[in-house]
Amino acid sequence: MKGGEGKMDRKTVEKLRRMQMKALCLKLANLIPQDYLSKNFQANFVAISQTTKLEFKFPVVEVRHQDQNLEVLLISSLKKRIALHEVIRIVEDGGADVVNASFSIVGNKIIHTIHCQAISSRIGLDASKVSKRLLQLIR
């Protein structure tokens, strides 16, 4: 995305990925019977779950465009949700066909990831239009 509007740097993306993995590990640990866990293992998970939480300004929009592919990353809070059907409509209006859409809830955040391809390789995608309209949607 040009101009840096709403673009997250690598550190932020990596922190979010780590937070998501931490949440998934905690869910997995809760599924394991307590009899199988050692005391040291339990203490580590308690320490991880009590670490400080990172604060970000919500919502965050990142649009990545490469060749005929488009990836949209939206991060919003649970309090101010973004309607996924509206995001998909905007992406399709920009000349893309949604290949995959998923979301994860991590703490108080909802992370939407949408993978798209150009409807027509001759016409291509208008990533800047998609980005501008998504920024309008979240404000």
Image (spheres, grey):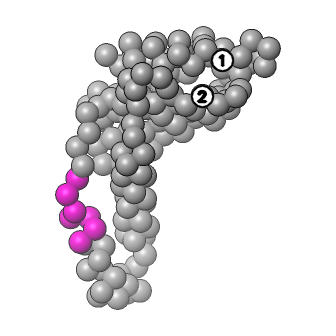
Q: Is residue 47 left or right of residue 86?
A: left
Asked if residue 16 shows in the view, the reply is: no
Find the magenta span and give its range.
47-53
Q: Which class describes the residues within 10 Å of circle 1: few (<14), some (14-19), or many (20+)? A: many
| Picture mark count | 2
Q: Disc 2 to disc 1, how far (Cα)? A: 8 Å
x and y, in percent, of residue 73 in the image: 48, 34
x and y, in percent, of residue 131 in the image: 48, 19
Question: In the rendered structure, which disc, 2 or 1, sits on the residue that comes first in sequence?
Answer: 2
Give the residue at x 25% y 33%: 57
The residue type indicated by label 2 comes to His
Disc assigned to residue 65: 2
Q: Pointer 2 and pointer 1: residues touching (CB < 8 Å)? A: yes
Q: Which quadrant would residue 126 be assigned to in this image?
A: top right
Q: Quadrant location of the C terminus?
A: top left
Instruction: From the viewer's side, name the closer residue of 95 and 24.
Output: 95
Looking at this view, name the residue that lies furthest to the front: 3
Give the residue at x 34% y 82%: 41
Determine whether the residue tagged by mark 2 lies in a helix, strand or loop.
strand
Q: Is residue 48 magenta?
A: yes
The residue type indicated by label 1 comes to Leu
Q: Which quadrant would residue 62 be assigned to in this image?
A: top left
Q: Which quadrant would residue 37 be assigned to in this image?
A: bottom left
